[in-house]
Amino acid sequence: MAYLWSTMETNLHAAFTGHRTYDGRGDAALRALLDAMYARGFRTFLSGMAVGFDLAAAEAVLVLRSRCSDVRLVAVIPFAGQERFYTPRDRARYAEAVARADERVVLRPAYGPGCYRVRNDFLVEHADEVVAWYDGSTGGTRYTVGRALRLGLRVRNLCPEGPVLSAPAPAPVPTLF
């Protein structure tokens, strides 16, 4: 996997993770959070481009970019052809967001076992903070949120029914005496 943007950047990076069943009711909170993150120095936003929260977040970043030209959207695509499984409406949304993204990172040439985990790991490893729509259920969002927390990242969960998230306490340092 290549880290394609400059490692000399000083702006902060945020990644999105969320359920495919996202129904849009967090859109206002997402837009407000993006404005607040921008004020804190976040300029690069990574979306895994899945149907649901990922696409909604990518679209919200594009709206923010229409007002703030230094905002960047990075489309992190788990495999070439990801969109072929989408409905025609979601395929059109996906195509629009990918076309307008500042960068596209395609992690695998085709679908294969573990490709979504690789995408989720990439998102977390390249983020300073994670924005989630997480209701507490099992699946890729749970994996991504858990991994982000284990790495000590702040996770902002916009789902009102979701659990309160906090990073695990650091392991105690053993005493030598």
Image (cartoon, rainbow, N blue to C red):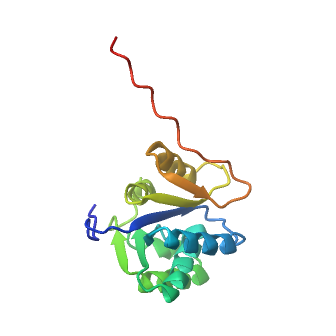
Q: Nearer the viewer, residue 13 or 22?
A: 13
Apparent side of residue 111 relative to residue 96 in the rendered image (left or right): left
Q: How far across and how far down the image is residue 116, in percent? A: 45, 58
Give the residue displayed 46% in from the left and 64% down from the top.
14
**Position above or below: 130 against 9:** above
Q: Nearer the viewer, residue 42 or 118?
A: 42
Q: Does the image show residue 148?
A: yes
Q: How far across and how far down the image is residue 12, in percent? A: 41, 65
Give the residue displayed 66% in from the left and 48% down from the top.
164
Image quarter of the C terminus: top left
Give the residue displayed 68% in from the left and 59% down from the top.
159
Residue 119 falls in image quadrant: bottom left
Q: Nearer the viewer, residue 113 or 52?
A: 52
Q: How far across and how far down the image is residue 30, in percent? A: 62, 70
Extreme top residue here?
177
Image quarter of the N terminus: bottom left
Residue 92 falls in image quadrant: bottom right
**Position above or below: 175 against 80:** above
Q: How many marks?
A: 0
Give the residue displayed 51% in from the left and 59% down from the top.
130
Apparent side of residue 14 relative to residue 4 in the rendered image (left or right): right
Q: How far across and how far down the image is residue 161, in percent? A: 74, 54
Q: Does the image show residue 91?
A: no
Extreme bottom residue here?
66
